[in-house]
Amino acid sequence: MQQNEFEALVKELCAKESLPQALELLKQSDDADIAQAAHSLSGQFALADIEGEQRIYHVFVQTDEQGVEQEYVEHIMNEGEDVIKFVAWFFEALFDVKVKDTYQAAGKTYKQPKRS
């Protein structure tokens, strides 16, 4: 995928209002790798009310070193936050694109989270 195509896709994704809408658009991508990656994520997101926030998690099962399946949960974003968070996570997790580069393609400034 060319840089200008990536930028156009990221901007189109960021125009969506929610993670499900953005994921659906990714599934329809002309780029087979992106569409396949998006389809592989179907059904792997969960919404949980934590400390009064509606948090969206990626829930997946992976086999550990002992061959035992383990369930993992990764916080992606909160309900109502800018979809760029999901878009940046998607491209970093599945295509090794730096979060900063995805934000830049969207014309947004990435602020690194503060360490606690």
Image: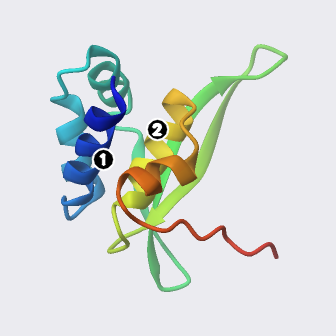
64 and 80: which one is in front? Answer: 80
Residue 66 vertical placement versus 19 (above, below): above
Residue 66, x across and y down, in percent: 84, 16
Locate residue 7 relative to residue 109 in the image: left or right: left
Tell me which numbered mark, 2 or 1, is placed earlier along the sequence. Answer: 1
Residue that appears at 32% across and 30% down: 38
Q: Residue under circle 2? A: 91
* Crowd band around label 1 with a 10 angstrom C-alpha radius: few (<14), some (14–19), many (20+): many
Residue 25 vertical placement versus 56 (above, below): above
Residue that appears at 32% across and 74% down: 80
The colour style of the image is: rainbow
Which numbered marker is on residue 10?
1
Looking at the picture, which amino acid does disc 2 mark? Phe
Residue 56, x across and y down, in percent: 44, 60
Element at label 2: helix
Foreground disc of the pair 2, 1: 1
Residue that appears at 58% across and 43% down: 98
Quarter the N terminus occupies? top left
Residue 57, x across and y down, in percent: 49, 54
Q: Does the CB distance between marks 2 and 1 fall below 8 Å?
A: yes
Residue 77 vertical placement versus 52 (above, below): above
Looking at the picture, which amino acid does disc 1 mark? Val
13 and 3: which one is in front? Answer: 3
Residue 25 vertical placement versus 80 (above, below): above
